[in-house]
Image (cartoon, rainbow, N blue to C red):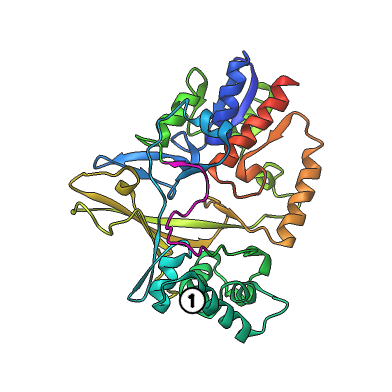
Amino acid sequence: MEKYDYLIVGAGLFGAVFAHEAKQKGKKCLVIEKRDHIAGNVYTKSVEGVNVHVYGAHIFHTSDERVWEYVNRFAKFNNYINSPVAIYGDELYNLPFNMNTFSKMWGIKTPAEAKKKIADQIADLNITNPQNLEEQALSLVGRDVYEKLIKGYTEKQWGRQCSELPAFIIKRLPLRFIYDNNYFNDRYQGVAEGGYTSMVEKMLDGTKVLLNTDYFDFIKDNPDIASKTVFSGMIDRFFDYSLGTLEYRSVRFETEVIDTDNYQGNAVVNYTDAKVPYTRIIEHKHFEFGTQPKTVISKEYSKEWKKGDEPYYPVNNDTNNALYEKYTALAKNRPDVIFGGRLGAYKYFDMDKVIAFALDTAGRELNG
């Protein structure tokens, strides 16, 4: 097999951006991907004419003008605004926590009334030094918001009682005392028209890509394929779990086509009651204001990660972070390998942060 400047492991956002930047600099790259498609977890595919976010909802949002300008080279973004709702029993609330939420919950109208209600609940709890996530959340938002909109969802998400989770997971819970359902504060927001797969395809245009190719099998047969490797897989797997296994949460999706034009009236509906087994339902057509006669929904079930599952959310507690630091020390002994992406960095990134990470990494590497 011919030789390359860079072997890029993973055809997700990090790998695709790095490949594009390297190609612009005249470098010869080979991208390998263990799955049967490009675009990693932002992969979208058409089902009944609906662009389905196969690995969960991906809404692009950023305040970084450099990143916004960059992605618009490869895709046109619509004006979708993320305004999820939450269902608790028979009650429906707007997210994020704002005056619409508080008005529905307490029958109040003004910010002053909402602030007093929350402050009174926090004062009654008398929590001065939160020892766990439950106490941290209660000390920030009071009992009503916590019980109805945080507790059940969080326990499903992490598979543990809130009282057993570390307080730092919820460092802050933004409370908006305005009637605004826009989930993000970022200046730029939208969904790629036609799906993200075509966006990544444009990034990879002109670069050789091998799908269904596992790095560890491939490199055994092609040890000298490239001068350097860009690895966006799991850093602990790269080192054969020699120091131990990092923890993740994974997600299972149940996706179905429903013979109706509108199932839930919103792209994202969270189910915050612990009695409901899934965390949320995504109705994909609403990301692109679809008018198709049928709809596609995905129920999301959070679960503990085990080897063989797709890792989604790193469990960034003190133990795992310390283990990751040991792996980064090992990585310093491999100057021929660049680690990146959410798995290589053991950090959950929004899309814009992955792209910024890849651009910065490529800039340092290619501009020397």
Rendered view: 363 above or below 300: above
Is residue 198 shown left or right of residue 20? Answer: left
Give percent across and percent down for residue 161. Answer: 57, 75
Give percent across and percent down for residue 335. Answer: 78, 30
Which residue is pictured at 56% across the width and 65% down the height? 158
Which residue is pictured at 47% across the width and 25% down the height? 73
Image quarter where the N terminus lies is top right
- Identify the magenta region: 176-190
Q: Amino acid at mark 1?
A: Glu
Give percent across and percent down for residue 289. Answer: 29, 44
Rendered view: 284 above or below 155: above
**Secondary-structure class at tag 1:** helix
Residue 361 picture quarter: top right
Badge 1 is on which residue?
Answer: 113
The one of 86 and 275 positioned closer to us in this rendering: 86
Give percent across and percent down for residue 220. Answer: 65, 31
Q: Is residue 332 visible?
A: yes
Prevailing SS of the magenta stretch: loop
